[in-house]
Amino acid sequence: MYPKEVYHFLVLHFPIALFSTAFIFDFIYVLIDKKEIKNYVCWTMGMGILWGFFSIISGYITAVELGYIESFFDISSKRHPLIMSLCVFYFIILFILRTKKSINNKILLFLHAFGVGLLMYGAHLGAKWADRI
C-alpha cells in the first residue's frame, strides 16, 4: 500500500482543476450569457468545493504523518494550509453569492479570478513546503 502522503498528492489536483475550469466557464458565461453555461460553473465549482474538503483532510493527515504539524491548531501558523482552507471557504461564499440574482456577473468573474489566483499561490506554497519545487 502507498504511504498516506501519496493520496494527498493525488487528491489536491482535483479542486485546482475544477475551480480553474469553473473560472473558464464563468468567463465564457460573461461573454455569451447562456444559462446552461452558468450551470457548468455551478457544477464545477460545487465539485471543486467537495474535492477541496477531501484535499484539506488528506493534507492534514499528510502533514501530521510527516511531522510538519503536530495538531489541528498548528494550521494557523503555516501559510499553505491556512490559505488553502480559506480558499475553499471563499469558494463556498462565492458559490452562495452566485445564487443571488442581484449581483453583476462581471463582479462575480473578478471575485472568481481572485479566488483562483489565491488558490494558485497556496498551491505554490504547498509545493515549496513539500520540496517539490
Image: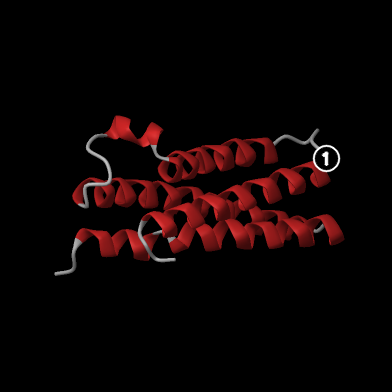
Residue visible at 82% across and 46% down in the picture: 106
Residue 7, compared with residue 49, is above or below; it is: below
Choose between 28 and 65: the one closer to the eye: 65
Q: Name the residue under label 1.
A: 104
The outermost residue toward the bottom is 1
Residue visible at 61% across and 41% down in the picture: 95
Task: Judge left or right: residue 61 versus residue 86.
Answer: left
Q: How is the image coloured?
A: secondary structure
Residue visible at 75% across and 49% down in the picture: 109
Residue 56, compared with residue 127, is above or below; it is: above
Mark 1 is on which residue type? Asn
**Circle 1 sits in a helix, a strand or a loop, which is it?**
loop
Image quadrant for the C terminus? bottom left
Task: Judge left or right: residue 53 versus residue 33.
Answer: left
**Residue 126 location in percent, x, y?**
43, 54
Choose between 88 and 96: the one closer to the eye: 88
The picture quadrant where one finds residue 18 is: bottom right
**Residue 30 location in percent, x, y?**
82, 55
Residue visible at 38% across and 54% down in the picture: 129
The picture quadrant where one finds residue 81 is: top left
Task: Judge left or right: residue 62 versus residue 21.
Answer: left
Image quadrant for the N terminus? bottom left
Residue 105, compared with residue 8, is above or below; it is: above
The outermost residue toward the left is 1
